Image: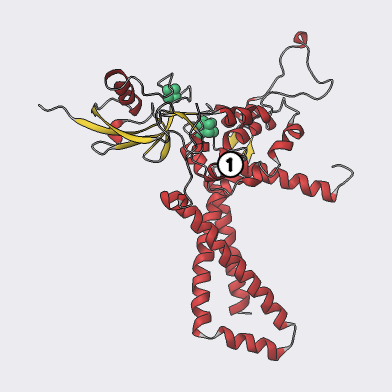
Amino acid sequence: MKPYVREYPNTWWLSRRPYFLFMVREFTAVFVAAYCVFLIYFVYKLSQGPDAYYGVIELLRSPLSIILHIIAFIFAIYHSITWFNLTPKIFILRFGEEQVPPFLISGANFIAWVVVSAIVAWIILVV
Amino acid sequence: MTRKTMELEILRYRPEKEERPTFETYEIPFKEEWVVLDAINYIKDNIDGSLSYRWSCRMGVCGSCGMMLNGIPKLSCAVFLRDYYPDKVRVEPLTGFPIQRDLVIVMDDFIHKLKEIKPWIIRDEGQEQSLEEGEYLQSPAELAAFKQYSMCINCMLCYAACPVYAIDNSFVGPAAIALAQRYNLDSRDHGRELRQDVIASNEGVWECTFVGECSEVCPKDVDPAGAIQRGKVSGTIDYFKDVLMPWGG
Ligand code: SF4
Ligand code: FES
């Protein structure tokens, strides 16, 4: 007798909260990637001399650009936090029989994040 | 005093008389100390003896009573009715597998995948110890390195939680990859390279998008999602070793 194969709906990611949050995490990657592309474009313009560079700066001042930046920023933060929280699954550190507790692994990432951000902020704002 | 009752909505599939599965609702007495499996046994004993499902130990050890309860894969012997009371519970066979009958799924694919990763200790040529030489010794630290992955009871809840597997059955899947890690990380084993054919393939670790639900639903804290991600890391290291040190590092 023939086993029955149930269809798996395309809306599976709406069926449960954890699936939905997974989709959000994946979706935010689009913004992170898009921003990387933008940064490369920015560097390219920089290489073309002061006029091209200030052209981009002007563009960045527009309200639309500011709104896009805020959205990209929020998504980048969400993306980073969700991934840092996952690092203990990927990186397991053992000393003999003991395993380094997961929160120390993710904690180290968060600390590194804050430190690097602070250094970048210092370079931009102070230097 | 009126007896408390509760409803179970069970997906039935009787291939001899119906084309597709349908839900049927059963009223059962509610008891504080009953697990969902007790209620299903009650239905089989008192309402409809033709209801088919798998179970054995009734204590979360054999791994045969996995079902979808309100859409989440669970061991039906490990969830109390009182966690749902007074609401109705929807009981379905594990997602991602063909239905043989009622709550019984076809698990051939899973068994095949377990075999495929060669779940036994493989020794290098000439490294086999004879019986007289005794057992391969292992320190507690060496045991701790893989113990977690050896706790799997093959309940398949992780497969039922995995959208990747549901969409594409060719994915080797969480429990099989965790089992491969269990042997790869065993100090007595030399078989990692043989297992890599399956594990490092497109249907292996790289098919995983890290939804992570397999580890959430696992009743034995095996953390198959972690096993898969570690497989990706070591696979990547292999790749760079190959590229940077083609003569073998
Ligand atoms: S890894 Fe966990 S959920 Fe998957 S089969 Fe093993 S015990 Fe069940
Ligand atoms: S009956 Fe054995 S695990 Fe539930």
Identified by mark 1, the residue type is Gly
Residue B60 visible in this rendered orientation of the protein: no
Residue B90 appears in the figure: yes
Residue extending furthest toward the bottom = A51
Horizontal and vertical percent for residue B246?
87, 46
Residue toward you, B230 or B111: B111
- Hey, which quadrant is residue B13 in on the image? top left
Q: Toward the viewer: B17 or A15?
A: B17
Q: Does B21 sit above or below residue A24?
A: above
Question: Where is B174 relative to B40, above or below?
Answer: below
Image quadrant containing the N terminus of chain B: top left
**Residue drawn at x 72%, y 25% as measured from the top left:** B188
Residue on which disc 1 sits: B226
Q: The residue marked by circle 1 belongs to what chain?
A: B
Q: Residue at x 49, y 84 (%)?
A: A63
Secondary structure category for the residue under label 1: helix
Asked whether A94 or B96 is in front, the reply is B96
Q: How many marks?
A: 1
Q: Residue furthest top?
A: B132
- Location of the C terminus of chain B by quadrant is top right
Q: Position of residue B238 (x, y in %)?
A: 76, 44
